[in-house]
Amino acid sequence: ILGFYISLAPFCGATLLRALANAVVADGERPKGIPLKLLVDNGSDYQDSGFLRACAKLNITVEPTKPKEPNAKANIERFFRTLNTGLIHKLPGTTFSNPNDRGDYDSQEMARITIDELRDHVETWIEHVYHIDTHRTLEQAPIDVWNEEAPECYPNTLTQQDADVLLRDEVERTLSKGMVEAHGLKWKCPALTTWEQAKLRLNQDRKVIVRIDELNLSEVYIATKDNSTKFHKALSRRPDYTRNLSLYEHKQIKEFTKKKRIKARIKRLSDKELYLLRLEYKASLGRG
């Protein structure tokens, strides 16, 4: 198992990119590598432009499985079952596989772990249980098979810094006063101030490439079309509000403001007001 990602955000292109990053970024002696091919199901999220662009950049062939052929990805379905029985159903708050197995167990009342703790549990289980137990089909431990085969195929990896820039959605925007705007939010990039001023003097196009991590809107990366390989970090103009803010949550907060009949648009609220609004939205989730 090269990588995984567990998120409270709905499955989407951004969560796919996080899972891909977890698989391809070098991490000590753990098995990691850029695959030659990815077999995926036919969900529309696998056609997300950011995901497909990243795979193309990494020379990964994305091959959808045929509809209604579960055996095409039987290995991963079997892994999920092993993960559930070996770990998930043993954690407090499990919903089990079905109502009959759950019985009178109150899953919500018994839930005791955070999502970060869940990620740690899964990572530990994969590394210290799944990878070292003998696999029925392989007749060996998966880690032993990896250690035997990896030296012959030399799997390539990415650095964390390269992955941070590459594995994001990509949009085109116009740089204005050193800033770009998307989804009603702005990010400032001082490194491109001189470039923008030169374009203004020559009355030339100021469109730039913006790479956005939809699971963390606190920063983006920007490159000019003149130099599309050199990306500069741009920080949010709403640092408190956007810290670890996902696009999904941002959209939900927008809807929340409408329901509360807050007349001021989000972009007109102060950072402190937005931060408090975000806390209020989260609190409302617990009240159902």
Image: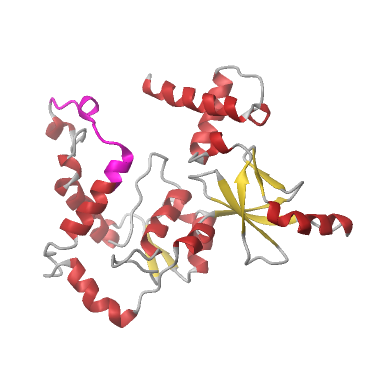
x and y percentages locating residue 91 in the rendered image: 18, 39
x and y percentages locating residue 259 in the rendered image: 55, 19
Residue 164 belongs to the span the image colors magenta:
no
Residue at 19%, 62% in the rendered image: 131
Q: For residue 127, what is the image quadrant?
A: bottom left
188 to the left or right of 33: right
The residue stretch that appears in magenta: 104-119
Q: For residue 40, what is the image quadrant?
A: bottom left
Q: Residue furthest bottom?
A: 152
Q: How is the image coloured?
A: secondary structure
Q: Relative to 217, say whether 20 is above or below.
A: below
Residue at 70%, 46% in the rendered image: 179
- Please count the marks in the image: 0
196 to the left or right of 133: right
Q: Visible in this render: residue 65?
A: no
Q: For residue 218, what is the image quadrant?
A: top right
x and y percentages locating residue 149 in the rendered image: 25, 78
Q: Quadrant of the N terminus?
A: bottom left
Q: Relative to 111, say whether 229 is above or below.
A: below
* Residue placed most toward the observer, 83 or 103: 83
Q: Quadrant of the C terminus?
A: top left
Residue at 26%, 35% in the rendered image: 113
Residue at 30%, 58% in the rendered image: 69
Residue 105 belongs to the span the image colors magenta:
yes
76 to the left or right of 179: left
Q: Relative to 134, say whether 45 is above or below.
A: above
* Residue placed most toward the observer, 265 or 49: 265
x and y percentages locating residue 269 in the rendered image: 64, 26
Q: Visible in this render: residue 99?
A: yes
